[in-house]
Amino acid sequence: MFNALIVNKDDEGKTSAAVEQIGVDDLPHGDVTVAVEYSTVNYKDGLCIGPGGGLVRNYPHVPGIDFAGTVEASDDDRYKPGDKVVLTGWRVGEAHWGGYAQKARVRADWLVPLPKGLDTRQAMAVGTAGFTAMLAVMALEDHGIKKGPVLVTGAAGGVGSVATAILANLGHQVAAVTGRPETADYLKSLGASQIVAREEINETTKRPLEGETWGGCVDAVGGAMLARVLGQMEYGASVAAVGLAGGAALPATVIPFLLRGVNLLGIDSVLQPYQNRLRAWERIASDLPMDKLEAMVQPATLGDLPGLGADILKGQVKGRVVVDVNA
């Protein structure tokens, strides 16, 4: 028997989450059983734990959209007991039981070997948010980052924090957008050279184009903020869009794309091919400074998760929450 955070829904549609003991036979089918060591808390986890159940399809359910640990048993030749592995994406924690348990059983295709230079705790300090941030940085690089500063919206959140640290470590000037002035010192410690108030970007304007200000952008917000940013990009610059916190609607025109050649790059961390996932994790191991990574981390246990799920939905979580499932 082992501990897991179980989310249940009653006949009235109300959900509740509690740490319970379950057995290996309770786990869903899969090729590989992993002794989970660490997971994280992301926005989707908050939705899964929250009162409405959010993205969960079947109950009872174990949330946690990522995890890192050690292979315990495997029916796939690619993974052997003792191998260190990491998993992000593939609807784990939504359609399939996830990382908020001391054991998980998943398809071998969903796993990636833990790169040299990272331990399991560091991998989850990066987590899905950091993995997504690296995918966004790689997409900007593939399309060419221009001379101006790289804008990062939602910079104090998980994706924004890691994107800021990676870009700064690669030598780029980073302009970090935040709606919380108290996070300015934190963002500067990650390498941000400029702090931009959210109100400056969200200021209402009818102009589809403004001055060419940003050489690239990692947008973790979406909505009206993304629309405004598009009109501020340098000619031929790219915006890697990763989030929908500001809404799925895009109140923009085609003018930034037609007259300034702006590229809008959609980043989806869920169904990435194996080679992309492996490349991103190897880049994380080489290009993300671990001292800055540690500054982002807040530790948590399985018992902390119901409260943390509510906090992340309220935008009250800074940086990366790393869940030690064995604590």
Image: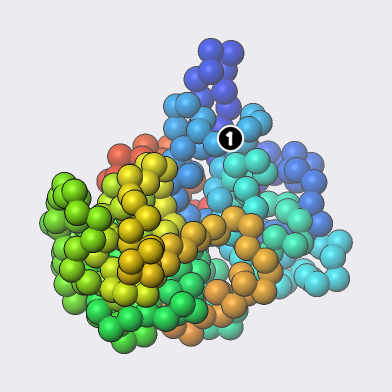
Where residue 258 sits: x, y (%)? 38, 64
In the rendered view, would you say 71 is above or below 206?
Answer: below
Q: Secondary structure at mark 1?
A: loop
In the shown orientation, is residue 126 left or right of residue 32?
Answer: left
In the shown orientation, is residue 210 left or right of residue 101?
Answer: left
Where residue 12 sits: x, y (%)? 53, 13
In the rendered view, would you say 43 is above or below 272?
Answer: above
Residue drawn 19% across the image and 76% down it? 193
In the rendered view, would you say 149 is above or below 245?
Answer: below
The kind of residue tagged 1 is: Val
Q: Nearer the viewer, residue 239 or 106?
A: 239
In the shown orientation, is residue 326 left or right of residue 292?
Answer: right
In the shown orientation, is residue 67 left or right of residue 310?
Answer: right
Where residue 186 sits: x, y (%)? 21, 66
> Which quarter of the rendered picture does the N terminus lie within?
top right
Residue drawn 54% across the image and 57% down it? 268
- Report the number of numbered marks: 1
Residue drawn 80% across the image and 72% down it? 78
Residue 210 visible to an observer of this rendering: yes
Q: Nearer the viewer, residue 126 or 224?
A: 224
In the rendered view, would you say 163 is above or below 50?
Answer: below
Identify residue for label 1: 56
